Amino acid sequence: MNRIVIVILLSFTLIGCTKTDIITIDVNPEKSRVVELNDLYSDPVFIRLETTDEFLIHDVTKFEIFNDRIYIHDEMFFGFLYCFDMQGKFLYKIVNHGDGAGENMAGFTIDRENGFLWITDDYQRISKYDLNGNFINEYRVEFSMRDVSVIPNAPDLFAFQIGYHAGKNYGFAIYSLKDNKYVDFRNYYTEFERWLSGRSLSSSQNNLICGFGFVDTIFTVDSLGFRPQYALNFGKHKVPDQVLFDQNHDRLNNTFLDPQKEYAGRISCVIETDDYLKFIYFFGGKRVLSFYSKTRNKLINISKVLLDNKKFELKNFFEVSENEQFYSVLYSENICGNKVNPDTTIKNQDTKGYGVYKDINQLKSVIKDGDNPIIMFGKGNVDQLFEKL
């Protein structure tokens, strides 16, 4: 344990020396609420993604909106990247072009300044594509990669969520492809923590932010490194070190997930706007969606989001912020209610398999269980939630 503590302290010393105005956020997971979908959105718009056997999405690992296109990474079955237009029409998909064992498509990002797609895999490679899905070239590095983001205003610099790397623990790195070297490296505690961390890098409004694992700190990421910006204080619910590790200190102790223990931690899915910080954490083994208001210095915990008493998956809410719109993912089984027989679809209804809907009841009348997910977007209603506190 002493070795781990020393590594963590050194990491904070190195990355913390350039930024001292860290904001502490008190998080009380015991105070959470159930909200309706309309409590989070005003006048939401729903994009029905086209569905066929050829481009059936099983799980949205990550998605981005850029230049009126929707890019979705589905990590299941070796991973695919799907591209749709803003009407939900399928445009193309990218299949990992490698032929080596274990070369799974692991993550992607969009270089918004130069107009490229970058795709990582589990086999020490990052590949470059144009925005129409055409392969350009690839780079080999000495580590496998999970999540990836381009560092804003820093050509050739990338933030990587590191998988296997000989001689280093799993963690996060800022890496220069041009110079083939690390600019900064941030360790995880354990290998097992890497598998639990989920997607941890998020870019919005030309700002890259990172929150991961059981480090209760959210970092700004730029060419200077990982700089602590927010410290989450879980109080009595913070996970003790003796719970995080077994006696050999090499893997997570599963009692963290015991709901009776009421431990809180494992930060992921962070986005930041001018007014809010949004993140996901686990409390008693279940996800909690949190919004922190910078102007009010207050936090709201959301345990469930409901529509017609059906629960939505919290990990995909307010996942992307783009042009003052918040984008979320809804899965068809949470919306459709009953399975729809295409032969009995209401006449004059839109049956081409994709489209934009402002009326969720109209959407429910045409989708069926097993269809591709729905992309929802609109203005956030978060202000009203805080006003009700």
Image (cartoon, grey):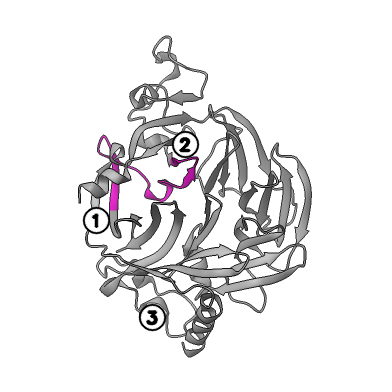
Q: Is residue 166 visible?
A: yes
Q: How many marks?
A: 3
- At label 2, which amino acid type do we have? Pro
- Residue span colored magenta: 302-328
> Residue at point 47% right, 85% down?
5
Give whichever of 302, 256 is nearer the camera. Answer: 302
Q: Earlier in the sequence, mark 2 or mark 3?
A: 3
Task: Indicate the position of residue 380 as horizontal and vertical percent values.
Answer: 36, 41
Left or right: where 166 falls relative to 172: right
Above or below: residue 344 compared with residue 48: above
- Whether residue 124 is in magenta: the answer is no
Identify the residue under disc 3. Answer: 241
- At label 3, which amino acid type do we have? Asp
Identify the residue under disc 1. Answer: 32
Residue farthest to the right, as pictured? 137
Q: Residues within 10 Å of mark 1 (few under 14, many from 20)?
A: some
Identify the residue under disc 2. Answer: 373
Give whichever of 329, 365 is nearer the camera. Answer: 329
